[in-house]
Image (cartoon, rainbow, N blue to C red):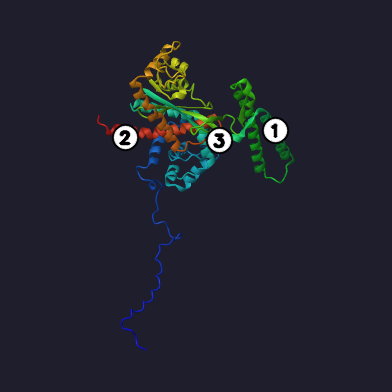
Amino acid sequence: MTTNPTAPPANPPFPAPAAPRLKCADREQLDPQPRRLEDLIEPEHRARVVWAFVEGLDLSALYARVRAVEGHAGRSAIDPRILMALWLYATLDGVSQARALARLCREHNAYRWLCGGVSVNYHTLSDFRVQHGTWLEEQLTAQVAALLAEGLVELKRTAQDGIRVRASAGASSFRRQPTLEACWDEAQAHVAQLREQRERNAGELSQRQRAARERAAREREQRIAQALEHVEEVAAKKKADDKAKARSSTTDPEARVMKMADGGFRPAFNGQFCTDTASQVIVGVALSNNGSDQGQMTPMLDHVASRYGRYPEHALVDGGFVNKAEIEHLSAPHRAVIVYAPVPKPKDDTRDPHQPLAHDADAVAAWRRRMGTDEAKVLYKERAATAECVNAIARNRGLQQFGVRGLAKAKAVLLWFALAHNLMRGVALRLNAAASPA
């Protein structure tokens, strides 16, 4: 057989694929880079800034509460500086749960560096976060006072705004008084039943399990008792026809259903931040279960004056705070605060809202005229740039919902956010002051 010289040559066979060359894990080898805890983070790491701040705090009140002392038996307590630094750094990092923080202390280099080889558990972290509310407020005062002494905070003009934060309670936990009374009877019966089982020493549960169940039952009984007290308080604020509709939560009796920023209604608390407009440093923190901002301005400014010895010259608030009586009170000689707040739109479209009414007090009439000037309109822009900015930063750091119950514990969490915020503002302000020409 002859071949055709013009025919194309046959395709050569493809070579067999080569085996891939990989770097595979070998967990039996020694760590090639053994390091000290000190070398886990770089010199300019933010964790070092937090630790330096904590080292400058007066923790004597916390050390006085430590029960473990030299010469007596018992396990050594965790240094409060470690717990303080962990929660400040966690707040800046957007970590709000004690269990998540405890896990990071084992796995994340920055948290491991802050721990310095000390083992922490979530229960200790959770308790420390909410046990020292009064002390935290004192630290906020000392923090702001130090910035005032350095000339980094003026306290000439403040902006105040509310931030509604979801409570640790569901809408379905709210009950009217007849239902709460029935729940109270059930809770009492359950506690009695568990006590009877303990006395009979039923063997199906361990002693630890029985204690846990009894504790949970007692706590529920206490919450329902508090809910019965608070439902009367809620009813007292309602009109006569609506008193029977008053409800209180069996999960967090101090929470109230409020209108949120998205227009929905949910169980929440109303937090208040008062901020120095020139530095964006938080100078005052408050928390209430009142869904309205009216009536919140005077207590806040009185609180600021009691802490720092003077009132701000100007107070900037939004329309939700507008209250003629407060404007009049704040203009008194011992306060002399000039309020900048939008004037409500009159029902009569033909009337100029900035013209005083016949029955207006002098301070209210001056407020109306003031808010109609171009100078006031320019100055009022500082409110959004300060108060709303601070609230947005807190939201971005995780202030979406409280993981604790009750006003006292929720306010402690709010104070952690204020301390962490001011810590970073202080760093920025000092850097700016050092960079600016003398």
Element at label 2 = helix
Q: Disc 1 residue type?
A: Gln
Image coordinates of residue 417 in percent, x first then y, are 45, 34
Q: Residues within 10 Å of mark 1 (few under 14, many from 20)?
A: some
Farthest residue, direction top: 358
- Image quarter for residue 220? top right
**Number of marks in picture:** 3
Tell me whether circle 1 and circle 2 mark residues in contact (CB < 8 Å).
no
Quadrant (top left/top right/bottom left/bottom right) for the N terminus:
bottom left
Labels 1 & 3 near each other (Cβ < 8 A): no
Q: At 44% from the left edge and 29% from the top edge, which residue is drawn?
A: 139
Residue at x 49% of width, y 22% of height: 294
Amino acid type, label 3: Ser
Q: 65 and 52: which one is in front? A: 52
CA–CA distance in space, label 1 to label 3: 24 Å
- Give whichever of 205, 72 is nearer the camera: 205
* 1 or 3: tag closer to the N-terminus: 3
Q: Residues within 10 Å of mark 2 (few under 14, many from 20)?
A: few
**Measured along the vertical axis of the image, is residue 356 above or below residue 321?**
above
Q: Residues within 10 Å of mark 3 (few under 14, many from 20)?
A: some
> Could you say which quadrant of the image residue 88 lies in?
top left
According to the picture, the residue beneath numbered tag 1 turns out to be 188
What numbered label is drawn on residue 168?
3
Q: Label 2 belongs to which residue?
A: 431
Task: Name the outermost residue toward the left.
Answer: 437
Disc 1 to disc 2, how far (Cα)?
A: 60 Å
The answer for how far apart the CA atoms under marks 2 and 3 are is 39 Å
Whether residue 132 is visible here, answered yes or no, is: no
**Residue 350, percent from left and from top:** 42, 18
Q: Earlier in the sequence, mark 2 or mark 3?
A: 3
